[in-house]
Structure formats: structure tokens, C-alpha cells
């Protein structure tokens, strides 16, 4: 059940009703934990993309990007004002974070002020493509989580599972 393709929902879909109660709960927990990693990578990608766009904007207006940086960091990396606090686990060593770092290194994110307009556009496109792919993966994971949650609710509602079984875990 810990196979990444199964967790992300990209493998052949299995009817949630075919899982035992323990398997259903374990898969749902695994998907929720994986979402923390995906969400982190997505927020970092969005922040980096916003910073690239701020650099483009700075060049167009010949202004200062420092206010944009503070805004990007406060909105993207913390999840914005509406997002509840998440665990402070370090997720930066995950493969998605490494992939984003590789994309940024390949396109010279660290020296974006030195890039010409075409290079800056290529950098923005590469980060945007990564963010879109991660967002799609996340949407698919949410669909899978919804299906698993609906099956758990059905089992409790129909008496196939009881709240007492939660205490046994």
C-alpha cells in the first residue's frame, strides 16, 4: 500500500469498498501525510514563481522588489492568512523539493537578476510547469481521499464499522 503510484492515485484505481477497515484507514492516513509534502513543494514553487514575476515587474517599472519579497514570503510559504498552522516538519529533503531545486538550478534561479528576459521567461515557464503538475497530482490525491473518506462514512453509517473500533487501534 505504500507504493507511491497507489498513494497518488495514478495507478489503476481500486474500489475503496474492497479494502479492509484497517487498510482503508492506513491508506487515507498515508495520502494525507503525502499531501503535506506535495503542499509544501507546491507552496515553495508558487513562491519562487511569484519572485520571478516580481523580478519581471521590477524590470518593467525599474522599481524595488523588496516589498514584493516580503509579501510573497508571508503569503506563499506560510499558506496565507486563511491557512491553519501545519506541523513544522522539515519536508525539504523530499524528491519533489529536490526536483524543484534542480529545475531552479538548471535555469539559474539563484542569479535571476543577471538573466536576460528570455532566460527569465524560461525560468518562469519551468517553475510554472512544475507547479501545475504538482497541483494536478494534489487534485487527484484529494479525489482519492474523498472516495476513501466517503467509504469510511458509509461503513460507520451502515454499522459495518463502529466508533469503538477506533479505540482498539
Image (cartoon, rainbow, N blue to C red):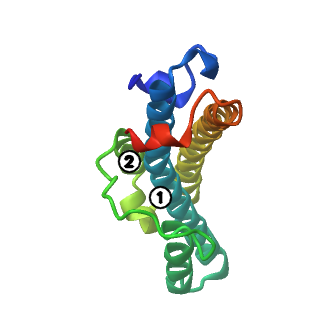
Whether residue 161 is situated above or below residue 17 in the rendered picture: below
Whether residue 103 is situated above or below residue 81 in the rendered picture: above
**Which residue corresponds to the image point at 45% horizontal and 28% vertical from the top-left?**
22
The residue at which mark 2 appears reads as 97
Q: CA distance from mark 1 to mark 2?
A: 8 Å
> In the rendered image, which quarter is residue 117 located in?
bottom right
Nearest the eye: 69 or 14: 14
Whether residue 68 is situated above or below residue 108 in the rendered picture: below
> In the rendered image, which quarter is residue 145 located in?
top right
**Which residue corresponds to the image point at 52% horizontal and 58% vertical from the top-left?**
43
Asked if disc 1 and disc 2 are in contact, CB closer than 8 Å, the reply is yes
Numbered mark located on residue 44 in the image = 1
Q: Which of the two labelled residues, at mark 1 and mark 2, occupies the earlier sequence position?
A: 1
Q: Along the horizontal axis of the image, is 117 left or right of 77?
A: right
The answer to whether one can see residue 4 in this image is yes
Label 2 crowding class (10 Å Cα cut-off): few <14, some 14-19, many 20+?
some
Numbered mark located on residue 75 in the image = none
Q: Picture coordinates of residue 108 (x, y %)? A: 39, 54
**Which residue corresponds to the image point at 51% horizontal and 36% vertical from the top-left?**
28
Q: Picture coordinates of residue 44 (x, y %)? A: 47, 58
The answer to whether one can see residue 116 in this image is no
> In the rendered image, which quarter is residue 94 located in?
top left
Q: Along the horizontal axis of the image, is 153 left or right of 124?
A: right
Element class at badge 1: helix
Classify the position of the N terminus by image quarter.
top left
Classify the position of the C terminus by image quarter.
top left
Element class at badge 2: helix
Nearest the eye: 53 or 96: 96
Q: Picture coordinates of residue 139 (x, y %)? A: 65, 40
Label 1 crowding class (10 Å Cα cut-off): few <14, some 14-19, many 20+?
many
Q: Picture coordinates of residue 7 (x, y %)? A: 48, 29
Nearest the eye: 57 or 164: 164
Amino acid at each position: 500500500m505504500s507504493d507511491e503510484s497507489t498513494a497518488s492515485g495514478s495507478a489503476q484505481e481500486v474500489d475503496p469498498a474492497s479494502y479492509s477497515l484497517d487498510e482503508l484507514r492506513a491508506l487515507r492516513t498515508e495520502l494525507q501525510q503525502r499531501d503535506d509534502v506535495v503542499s509544501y513543494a507546491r507552496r515553495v514553487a508558487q513562491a519562487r514563481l511569484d519572485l520571478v514575476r516580481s523580478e519581471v515587474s521590477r524590470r518593467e517599472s525599474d522599481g524595488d522588489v523588496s516589498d514584493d519579497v516580503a509579501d510573497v514570503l508571508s503569503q506563499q510559504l506560510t499558506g496565507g492568512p486563511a491557512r491553519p498552522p501545519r506541523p513544522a516538519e522539515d519536508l525539504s529533503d523530499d524528491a519533489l523539493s529536490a526536483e524543484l531545486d534542480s529545475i531552479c538550478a538548471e535555469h539559474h534561479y539563484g542569479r535571476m537578476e543577471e538573466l536576460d528576459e528570455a532566460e527569465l521567461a524560461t525560468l518562469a515557464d519551468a517553475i510554472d510547469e512544475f507547479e501545475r503538475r504538482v497541483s494536478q497530482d494534489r487534485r487527484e490525491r484529494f479525489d482519492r481521499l474523498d472516495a476513501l473518506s466517503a467509504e469510511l462514512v458509509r461503513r460507520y453509517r451502515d454499522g459495518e464499522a463502529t466508533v469503538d473500533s477506533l479505540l482498539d487501534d
